[in-house]
Every structure is written in C-alpha cells, then in structure tokens.
Amino acid sequence: MSGPLDGIRVLVLRPEHQAGELARRLEAEGATAVVVPAIRIVPPKSWTKADEAITRAPNFDWVIFTSVNGVESIMARMEETGSDLATLPERVGAIGPGTRRALESHGVAVEWMPSSYTSVRVADELPDPPARVLLVRADIATTDMDESLKARGFDVTRIDAYGTEVCNVDLVHKALDEVEAVALTSASIARSFVEACNDKRPGPGTVICSIGPATSAQCRKLGLAVTTEATAHDIAGLVEALKSWFGRA
C-alpha cells in the first residue's frame, strides 16, 4: 500500500499478540512492518504481594494500571484465584488508551487517565491526595512513578504484575540489517532490544523511534541514542513521529 512512509521498513518488537495495531498503522502509511518480537511476557517471580493486595483491594481508593500487559495479567490472576472484579477499588485509572480499552473489555469502568503518560504528569494529575493507591506495574519498571506519587502525598502500594524475557535474538540481529527504523513502544521493549542486540547495535543511519519519555530514558540508560520521540505517547503518535522524521508528514 502506497503512503507517506512508502519504502520504509520498520522493525516492530512488540510481543506477537500485541504487534498487530502498530503493524497495521505502519502499513496503512506505506511502510513495511518487520515484526520480530524481542520480548515475551511471563508471570512475576512471585504472586505473593499481588495476591495479598488483591484481597485488600477494597481498602484502596485507587487502582492504577500502567499497561495492557498489567491489565491482562491481573485479570487472569483474579480469575484463577476466584477473585471478584467487583472488589477492585471503585476508582480506576489507566495510563494510555490501550490500557483503558483493555480494562473496559473486562467490564471495568475507567474514571481517570492522565493528559500524557509520564510519571510526573501522572502524579500531578491524579485526583484527591492523600489517597491509598494500588499501582500495577511490570517487575522491571522504575520507581519514578511510585516516588512521584508519594511526594504528592499518596500512600502507594506497588505490585509487579508480570515479567519479561528476551526472545528471538538471532532474528533481531538479522532484521537490523534490513530496516531503516526501529519502533520502541515501551521501556521494557527498549531493554529487551538492547539485550537482544548484544554487541551489534543499529547502524548510524537507522532511526530509533521512542514512544515517550520513559522509553527514551531507558534508552539513554542503556547507551542507545534515540533519533526521534513521539509527541503523543501512543501507537498513533509513534507513527506520526516516524512520518515527521522521514519528512513525509
């Protein structure tokens, strides 16, 4: 399909079951999506803290989900343990439209979303401190959001809902020689990408496109230079950033 990204090959590293939306959006703009999952979602090392928090869920004022993976992992765990979704806190927050859609698909109403998806903005905009917040995260997520919420007066309990594993290392290496751009859609995917690359890094002409500040910060920590960052921190914003960089917006 011809479009503003015609001829551009973009490496998509999301887990296979989540790569479809980005691949479709890229291909609608004329790009070729080279889908090579670099990350596999796995259960957390221990469910103990999460299970304890779920049993105490009615005692929290808010539960904040930061990713689709966190939603799906907690929903599956609640079903497995026989927990009732009605016991979740009445006030539910979602970081990003994809996370919101995932919650709503399980019948969970979302009261609040931040205007952008950074730790500082989440802490600044979450209503009604002080309040007790259950924060659902990946096990490798930084503590920036936790600390920002605490600094504003929230009582934060964090649970790690899932872990990640690097996969398809050889395929990532091969794909790097075939693409003009790499799409990084989360900090965990940035980390997995760098681990998969090992000593082989993208060439100087390869565009590294980050979905937002947290992902870019992870890249800098790992020594990976970000070429361009999405203004709107979602899949649509990532595609727009690529279009702008290649001068075809």
Image: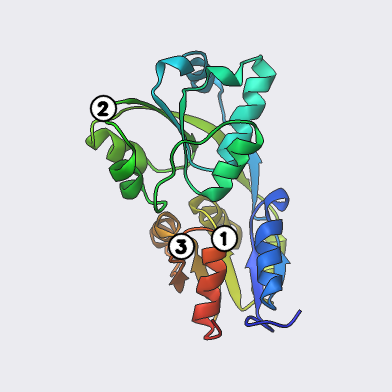
The x and y percentages for residue 5 are 63, 80
Q: Determine which residue is flagged by label 2.
A: 130
Label 2: element kind: loop
| Residue 43 in sight from this viewpoint | no
Residues packed near mark 1 inside 10 Å, few (<14), some (14 to 19) or many (20 plus): many
> Mark 2 and mark 1 in contact (Cβ < 8 Å)?
no
Which of the two residues, 55 or 144, is positioned nearer the viewer here? 55
Does residue 206 sit above or below 74 in this rendering?
below
Q: Determine which residue is flagged by label 1.
A: 235
Q: Is 235 on the left-hand or right-hand side of 80?
A: left
Q: Quadrant of residue 93?
A: top left
Label 3: element kind: loop
| Residue 6 in sight from this viewpoint | yes
Q: Is 178 on the left-hand or right-hand side of 131?
A: right
Q: Quadrant of the N terminus?
A: bottom right
Which of the two residues, 236 or 69, is positioned nearer the viewer here? 236
The x and y percentages for residue 32 are 71, 74
Residues packed near mark 2 inside 10 Å, few (<14), some (14 to 19) or many (20 plus): some
Residue at screen point 32% across, 36% down: 127
Does residue 8 sit above or below 129 in this rendering?
below
Q: Determine which residue is flagged by label 3.
A: 232
Residue at screen point 45% across, 72% down: 228
Which of the two residues, 109 or 124, is positioned nearer the viewer here? 109
The x and y percentages for residue 86 are 57, 19
Distance from disc 1 to disc 3, alpha carbons, whole Å, reads 8 Å
The x and y percentages for residue 162 are 57, 35
Distance from disc 2 to disc 3, alpha carbons, whole Å, reads 29 Å
Residues packed near mark 3 inside 10 Å, few (<14), some (14 to 19) or many (20 plus): some
* Amino acid marked by disc 3: Ala
Q: Is 3 on the left-hand or right-hand side of 92?
A: right
